[in-house]
Amino acid sequence: MSTSAKTFPIWAFFSLLTNGILMLAVILLIWQQQRLAAFFGIITSPESINLNNSSQIATPDLGRRHQLTYQEWVEILNQEAQVAADQHPPHLTILAGDSLSLWFPPELLPEGRNWLNQGISGETSNGLLKRLKIFDRTQPEVIFVMIGINDLIRGISNGEILDNQQQIINYLQKTHPRAQIVVQSILPHATEEASWKGREKLLGVANSRIRKLNQQLQSISTKKGVKFLDLYPLFTNKQGNLRREFTTDGLHLTPEGYIVWRSALQIYSEIELKSQR
């Protein structure tokens, strides 16, 4: 054998195998749930979703939140977190992030968990880092983190984003040592097809940069010993951009997009998280 030949590590094989199974399982589950969505007629406008029948701990009025200041928003999340801390619901799972997490329809979140949504529209990695203490007293089983797209839109460097991400991981590991922390990849955007109000700034962020940032984020997660859920490939078209049917404006997600995300969370929890408990 040539000295230049390299062996393919067995862990890498099982990693690829697991990812392949995850992708296939997600595709099948998406197909099944999209049929159900078509049958039952899932609401297509985030503004019209009524959270009063939510299985979440808190049932905020998302429409009213758009009229609040950032600090008022933080206070509401603080109150919701305190309820979770006092009630100690089983299988508490936290979504921490920006508007993508905020708008996750409660009826589409995986069942069997009590979900605490700690998303704020327009949130950055630094903003999230500063408010993690809000849910210090809770006892989550799993914490899903997705943050970074607003940093990119605001022109924040990759280095600063990654540094904030590391600090977020460090804080969560120290404060919630028994929780499984899952860092989720930053999602792509729809480039020229985007109609979002901040379109010009969005177009200044290449999806290739997001992919590279996700790779670095995955490396950090591995070094820190936390999970990394790569959602990016599930949302892209052949050009590597956010698929049209998954987005309302080139940045935010349609119910179909959230079905993809839900499916990934559901399958990932079955394959990765349960095996680690």
Image: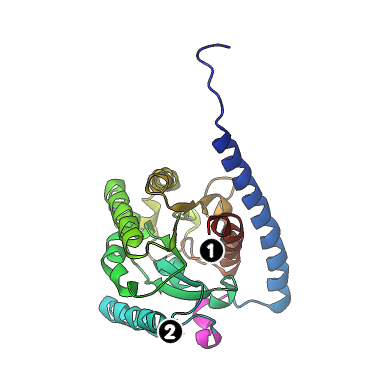
Q: Residue at x 71, y 72 (%)?
A: 36
> Label 1 belongs to which residue?
247
Residue placed at 50% from the left, 57% from the top? 193
What's the colour scheme?
Answer: rainbow
The quadrant holding residue 77 is bottom left
- SS at mark 2 in the image: helix
Q: Is residue 66 visible?
A: no
Tell me which amino acid carries mark 1: Thr
SS under mark 1: loop
Asked if residue 198 lies left or right of residue 240, the reply is: left
Q: Nearer the viewer, residue 271 or 32?
A: 271
20 left or right of 98 in image: right
Q: What segment carries the magenta color? A: 44-53
Q: Tell me, yes or no, whether the highlighted magenta stretch contains residue 108.
A: no
Viewer can see residue 23: yes
Three-letter amino acid code of the residue under disc 2:
Gln
**Residue at 56% across, 54% down:** 272
x, y (%) of residue 234? 58, 53
Q: Position of residue 210 (x, y in %)?
A: 42, 48
Please tell me the numbered disc located at residue 87. 2
